Image (cartoon, rainbow, N blue to C red):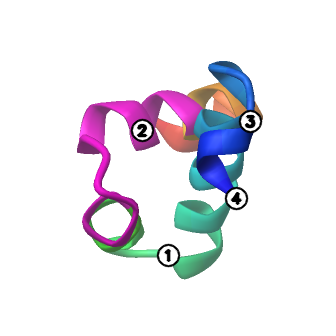
C-alpha cells in the first residue's frame, strides 16, 4: 500500500502505527516498513506533536 501513497501519507500512517505499539514502536515499524526511524518519528510528531516528545 505504501508505494501508492503520496509523500506525507506514509509518514502519518507509520507514525500512528508506531504510537499504537507503544515502547519501541518506532523501531518495530521502521524495520517492518523499511523506512528510517527518523521518518517514523516525524510521522508521530505530525500526528500528535504534543504527546511524542
Depth-wise, is mark 4 or mark 2 nearer the camera?
4
Quadrant of the rendered image containing residue 37: top left
- In the picture, the disc for residue 40 is none
Residue drawn at x 43%, y 43% as measured from the top left = 40
Say left or right for 48 vs 52: right
Q: Please report the bounds of the magenta region as a residue range.
A: 30-43
Q: Earlier in the sequence, mark 2 or mark 1?
A: 1
Depth-wise, is mark 2 or mark 1 nearer the camera?
2
Q: CA distance from mark 3 to mark 4?
A: 7 Å
- What residue sits right under mark 3 in the picture? 5
Residue drawn at x 31%, y 46% as measured from the top left = 35
Q: CA distance from mark 4 to mark 1?
A: 23 Å
In reply to whether residue 41 is colored magenta, the answer given is yes
Q: Earlier in the sequence, mark 3 or mark 2?
A: 3
In reply to whether residue 4 is colored magenta, the answer given is no
Residue drawn at x 29%, y 32% as measured from the top left = 38
- What residue sits right under mark 1 in the picture? 22
Residue 52 at x, y percent in the picture: 53, 41
Farthest top residue in view: 7
Q: Are marks 2 and 1 in contact (CB under 8 Å)?
A: no
Q: Are marks 3 and 4 in contact (CB under 8 Å)?
A: yes
- What residue sits right under mark 2 in the picture? 41
- What residue sits right under mark 4 in the picture? 1
Amino acid at each position: 500500500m505504501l508505494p501508492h501513497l503520496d509523500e506525507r501519507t506514509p509518514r502519518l500512517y507509520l507514525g500512528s502505527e508506531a504510537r499504537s505499539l507503544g515502547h519501541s514502536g518506532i523501531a518495530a515499524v521502521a524495520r517492518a516498513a523499511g523506512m528510517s526511524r527518523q521518518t517514523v518519528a516525524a510521522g508521530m510528531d505530525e500526528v500528535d506533536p504534543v504527546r511524542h516528545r
